[in-house]
Amino acid sequence: MNTPTHSLIIMLVVLLILTITSITCMILKKKNPARDYAELRLKIQSWWVMILVLFLVLLLNRGFFIALSAFISFLALKEFFSIVPLRPTDRRVIFLAYLAIPFQYYWIYSAWYGMFVVFIPIYMFLFLPMRMVFTGETKGFIRAAGIIQWALMLTVFCISHIPYLLMLPVKNDAAGAIGLVLYLLFMTQLNDVSQYIWGKSLGNNKILPLISPDKTWEGFIGGVGTVIICSTFIAPFLTPLSYIEGALAGGLIAVAGFIGDIVVSAVKRDLHIKDSGTLIPGQGGILDQFDSLTFAAPLFFHFLYYLVY
């Protein structure tokens, strides 16, 4: 897959930012040798690995990126099932939930939009409870059905919207299909970082203190505003959206990302855990990294699909 100019520029900018961050961390360590920067170094190292793998796979072939996304969905679903209470009688049902992953990503690879968009929220959502009935166990049925269905929706259906962006017809030749993926990931991450910075700098009024004590109105508004401004100029660079449409897309991604973050936080609060896992050093688990995207990816995809395709 040839790399369009605009997408290559964004990749280089991201690598430059990572390089500056790494150098800054080393300078801070030299200036303050007594201070522990181990966690920060782990975070930066994890970002280097994740970004390099992402860029390499995107540059190789769309099939590789679809396969990587399927693997991420598998890890996320496995992680979700490892932290929630499940009934022993539902083992076969859970296996069927895992089996939905290759089917869902095959619909993407074959660009079968109709099946992609209904397979999990209709067919799997109807089939799984039906299969659960045949176990003969009614105690905890509603809770178990809800957990399995919600896990499938969050970790497979929502995440699978990211690779489908590569299957959409190219409307911006300078950015290519890769541009859509880079735009979504870049704006989502910018939203997380900017909300954190604004919140730490000016945050006083908490939004949901019982769910996410660090989230403030100042951080939320500052983050959304930052993403809208950046998206206004970056969206036409990487996507077929206009400046106004880019501003709307930025606002949508920022708000959706915030909601995805607090929804996963609510899940962790309910289970009395800090992170969803320990797979990524210094970063937590897969769900910790994809919480914002679980809401932002499908909403951005269908916003784009409605406006352009």
Image (tube, rainbow, N blue to C red):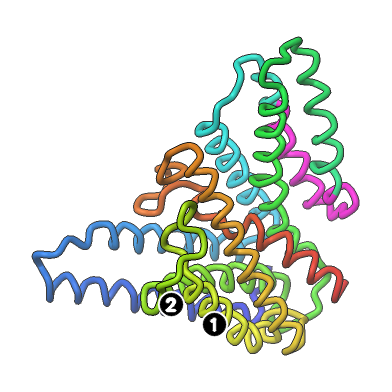
Task: Indicate the quadrant where residue 262 lies.
Answer: bottom right
The magenta region covers 96-117
Q: Nearer the viewer, residue 281 or 230?
A: 230
Question: Label 2 belongs to which residue?
Answer: 198
Please, is residue 164 above or below residue 222 in the view?
above
Asked if residue 105 is among those painted magenta in the image, a careful observer would answer yes
- Element marked by disc 2: helix
Please, is residue 222 above or below residue 263 in the view?
below
**Left or right of 147 on screen, residue 129:** right
Looking at marks 1 and 2 on the same chain, the residue that comes earlier in the sequence is marked by 2
Amino acid found under the numbered disc labelled 1: Thr
Q: Can you give x and y, in whole percent of width and height, for residue 171 in the image?
A: 81, 79
- Pick the quarter of the image with the C terminus: bottom right
**Left or right of 287 on screen, residue 133:** right
- Report the residue at 81% width, 35% height from top: 124
- Element marked by disc 1: helix
